[in-house]
Image (cartoon, grey):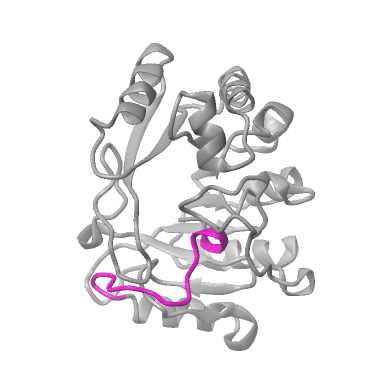
């Protein structure tokens, strides 16, 4: 399917929860966020229906996000459900990695193909300060588990202030070189001001080539991270929400007052 700017839309990012076991400074305030009510969170069956409809419209790439997707109860079952949908060619997950050592093998057996793992520093103290509650060693264990399970290529997402030449970023890059990991540097964004840039080493942030839609944990399809446009599958129906999201996808993002990284997965 193509939008009005002739961009082929084939990528759906699915936020399965707004919950997270970390409190990264650039993602949420220290005291947390106002969480979506459990009764408003999409069921696995609803998510599956969205995927099946999306595939009928040309979606063939799915990424599961959060919050932290691995805190969603039964997440392995959801992965298996999506993996069985004919037409899904690429099934991946973005995670902070801290729980991957518990889930990597099950996720791979369920049909997950690869993972992106967030890692902004190799210094345990700095990692703790950035995440407020995190333990760097658990992420390293998660990376090892993902490799053993075959969830490759493993891509590392590293948030930087300005440049990959920053000390933390250079240490992350060295770690990735030494461990056969792909690294992508993402400059810190501001949703409200519409501040974003192209991902260094990746494809995100290039509006002219944007091929993605986003599904929030409470059932809203968003055509752009930096826009307040959103279309509820529960109010419009899944097909109606898809059609409006594709038809109104902007050429470029300008800013959003309602979106939060914590509930749309970046």
Majority secondary structure in the magenta region? loop
The residue located at (24%, 70%) in the rendering is 252
Question: Which of the two residues, 208 or 102, is positioned nearer the viewer here?
Answer: 102
Indicate yes or no whether the magenta region holds residue 199.
no
Q: Is residue 211 left or right of residue 113?
A: left
Using the image, determine if residue 93 lies above or below residue 231: above
Q: Position of residue 30 (x, y in %)?
A: 59, 55
Using the image, determine if residue 120 lies above or below residue 243: above
Using the image, determine if residue 102 lies above or below residue 202: above
Question: Which of the two residues, 134 or 236, is positioned nearer the viewer here?
Answer: 134
Q: Position of residue 178 (x, y in %)?
A: 39, 12
Q: Position of residue 53 (x, y in %)?
A: 56, 68
Q: Position of residue 145 (x, y in %)?
A: 63, 21
Quadrant of the frame with the N terminus: bottom left
Q: Is residue 86 left or right of residue 202?
A: right
The residue located at (36%, 29%) in the rendering is 168
Q: Is residue 242 left or right of residue 66?
A: left
The residue located at (47%, 24%) in the rendering is 123
Q: Which residues are magenta?
A: 250-264
User: How many circles with numbers are drawn on the protein?
Assistant: 0
Quadrant of the frame with the C terminus: bottom left
Q: Is residue 116 left or right of residue 99?
A: left
């Amino acid at each position: 399917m193509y939008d009005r700017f002739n961009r082929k839309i084939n990528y759906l990012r699915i936020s399965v929860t707004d919950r997270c076991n970390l409190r990264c400074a650039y993602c949420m305030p220290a005291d947390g966020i106002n969480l979506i009510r459990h009764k408003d969170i999409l069921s696995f069956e609803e998510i599956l229906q969205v995927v099946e409809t999306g595939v009928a419209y040309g979606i063939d790439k799915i990424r599961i996000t959060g919050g932290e997707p691995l805190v969603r109860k039964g997440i392995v079952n959801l992965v298996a459900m999506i993996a069985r949908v004919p037409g899904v060619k690429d099934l991946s997950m973005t995670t902070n990695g801290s729980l991957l050592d518990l889930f990597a093998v099950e996720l791979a057996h369920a049909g997950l193909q690869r993972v992106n793992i967030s890692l902004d520093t190799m210094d345990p103290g700095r990692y703790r300060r950035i995440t407020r509650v995190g333990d760097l060693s658990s992420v390293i264990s998660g990376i090892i588990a993902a490799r053993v399970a075959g969830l490759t290529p493993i891509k590392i997402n590293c948030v930087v202030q300005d440049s990959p030449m920053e000390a933390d970023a250079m240490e992350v890059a060295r770690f990735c070189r030494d461990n056969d990991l792909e690294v992508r540097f993402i400059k810190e964004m501001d949703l409200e001001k519409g501040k974003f840039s192209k991902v260094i080493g990746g494809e995100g942030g290039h509006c002219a080539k944007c091929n993605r839609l986003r599904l929030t944990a409470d059932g809203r399809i968003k055509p752009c991270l930096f826009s307040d446009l959103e279309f509820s599958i529960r109010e419009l129906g899944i097909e109606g929400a898809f059609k409006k999201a594709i038809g109104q996808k902007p050429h470029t993002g300008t800013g959003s007052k309602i979106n939060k990284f914590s509930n749309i997965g970046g």
